[in-house]
Amino acid sequence: MNIPFSYSLRNLWTRRLTTVLTASGMALVVFVFASVLMLAEGLRKTLVETGAYDNVVVIRKGSHSEVMSGIDRLQASIVETQPEISIGENGKRLLAKEIVVLVNLSRRGSDKPAMIQVRGIGEASLPLRPQVQLTAGRLPRPASFEIIAGANIAKRYKGGGLGETLRFALSDWTVVGIFDAGNTGYSSEIWGDADQLMRAFRRPVYSSVLFKLRSSSDFQGFKELVESNPRFTLEAKRETQYYADQSEMMSNFLSLLGLSLTTIFSLGAVVGAMITMYAAVANRTGEIGTLRALGFRRRNILMAFLIESLLLGLTGGLVGLFFASFMQLLTISTMNWQTFSELAFSFSLTPEIVGQTLFFSLAMGFIGGVLPAFRAARMNIVDALRAA
Amino acid sequence: MEQRKFIVEINHLYKSYRRGSQILPVLQDITLDIAEGEFLALMGPSGSGKSTLLNLIAGIDKADSGSVRVGGLDITALSETELAQWRHSHVGFIFQFYNLIPVLTAFENVELPLLLSGLSRKERKEHARMALRIVNLADRMEHYPSQLSGGQQQRVAIARAVVTDPVILVADEPTGDLDRVSAKETLDLMERLVHELGKTIIMVTHDPRAAEKAHIVRELDKGVLNADIQAGH
Ligand SMILES: Nc1ncnc2c1ncn2[C@@H]1O[C@H](COP(=O)(O)OP(=O)(O)O)[C@@H](O)[C@H]1O
Ligand SMILES: [Mg+2]
């Protein structure tokens, strides 16, 4: 049997000032570590929640995003007649041919411009996105200079509020409605009539075709048809996949940046833990000799000190995680580097991130504690007792 | 002539320490038999090798040559792991500075060696409680060492030493850090362990009053054991 767990725990408690200081250093690193993961996850979630599983996005092959895509009218109408498309309550197909362009808008309270995505929508665009709700005003009339603004735009951009006007494409556009799309990318978009926007921006092609599948299992067949037929230069993705792909580059970049940063920071925390643990071993040399004399083995000593330092790491981990969890209350606005448009999202804490963070903090405790623990375990009994 | 059987038999034991390139002989050709139920005091000037001899008997140090048999088993031939197990079940340690674990209560300190035995939790509690009763500290079980006097701490240490029911007890200057009253209590207690529980005690001491309690006093001088001096019994 091992040296009791409470031995390690109480030793940490006995030197609580050192414990608190060391654990704080670790907590700081853990905080950064968890925050970065939460940021990447929040971004991913925002983008993925933007899509629905049974919706299909059709874009030009190899264009990655709607902004870079272009689908001519002929191809769009062929897609429109496919049998896989669901029919809505009004007897019309649940399909929208949309156009996406980028415009520069200024934030409220500053002149700093930011790129905003403007989406030209069709009749089916709203029914296809049940998470988008008109919260004020009305929908834009076709062939008018009317638009509706996402809640985020209304709140944060000059001229984005209800009844205000925005200027782009050499025209003034009146905001006649505000829509809320929850925590999705649409909340940071401006929507207007597709044909009107195509005229205003002098763009002859659509950006994407979005439709709902009649049956979820039809997807594979449709995808094969679209992607194998040489008449088409298109690719089809489930909407969820489309947005997951959109988020991948940025969330990978964030994770990588964050993890390399925290790796460097964690060196400091690990050295801190190591110093603390070496001091603990030196202070308890006599105790180590006594335990060995009583019959405890080297590996029991090793375990006791390792557990102590793992507990130290865990303490740092829990404290860091506790503070990081408050980051969920924060909303971050940033560039979506894939489309170069503004995107608002929150830090998101998942059980997976909790697991990774605790593992990371335990790893710091382990790395900091392993050498001191080996020193403790290697001691000669008589020398240790004489040192007391 | 000697009817009692010897529990400890030491034969031609040599031990030296290396200090840099120098070899420092500490024990030279020690031969000593200790009978079961004996209370033996080892005396001698500082640095004469008393602690070293005690450590060799207790199996926490390695001899250069010669043998130490305890209960017929030559412990100099045991591996480190075997020695640890052997110490746990055969030796009780009493130290000058008690060497209690400061973060454990008196009760937990006494229970500690039992964690290495196959006893159930319930049995461990019973044994630990009984050992604390023997040293008359049943009412101090939940105290931490820092909340106990030196004499009380030494009694907890003695309870820890006897809780596994070992054959021999080794004590290195057990009264060296105690006032006169506590020292007497400690010695009386050790005497009771010999008389009532039949323990064999090997005690290193400078204290003449401690030596008086012993049945036999042996003197080490510069690593050599002098001839017997029988105590006044
Ligand atoms: N681990 C060691 N390394 C070097 N020398 C030691 C060691 N242990 C003991 N000695 C030396 O051996 C001699 C005897 O020590 P010790 O047995 O502790 O004497 P005593 O207990 O009689 O005072 C001393 O000179 C001491 O300095
Ligand atoms: Mg000594």
Image (cartoon, coloured by chain):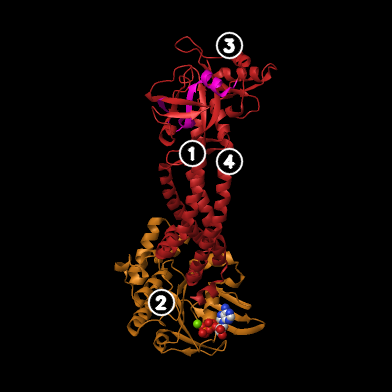
Q: Residue furthest right?
A: A230
Query: Which type of secondary structure does the marked residue at label 2 adopt?
Result: helix
Q: Position of residue A34 (x, y in %)?
A: 49, 47
- Residue type at mark 2 is Val
In 3D space, how far apart are the residues under numbered discs 1 and 3 (Cα atoms)?
37 Å
Q: CA distance from mark 4 to mark 3?
A: 38 Å
Which dot, 4 or 3, sits closer to the camera?
Answer: 3
Extreme front residue here?
A170
In the rendered image, which residue does mark 3 sit on? Answer: A81
Front: mark 2 or 1: 1
- Bounds of the magenta segment: A176-203
Viewer-side label of 2, 4: 4
Q: Earlier in the sequence, mark 4 or mark 1?
A: 1
> Viewed as shown, does residue B82 lie left or right of A313?
right
Q: Colour of chain A?
A: red
Q: Residue at x 37, y 60 (%)?
A: B125
Q: Which residue is mark 2?
A: B194
Which amino acid is tagged 4? Answer: Asn
* Residue at mark 2: chain: B
* Residue A56 visible here: yes
**Subunit under mark 1:** A
Foreground disc of the pair 1, 3: 3
Label 2: few (<14), some (14–19) or many (≥20) C-alpha neighbours in 10 Å:
some
Distance between the Cα atoms at labels 2 and 4? 73 Å
Q: Which residue is mark 4?
A: A252
Q: Amino acid at mark 3?
A: Thr
Q: Is mark 4 within 8 Å of ligand 1?
A: no
Residue pictured at 42% horizontal, 79% vertical: B174
Hey, what amino acid is under mark 1? Answer: Gly
Tell me whether circle 1 and circle 3 mark residues in contact (CB < 8 Å).
no
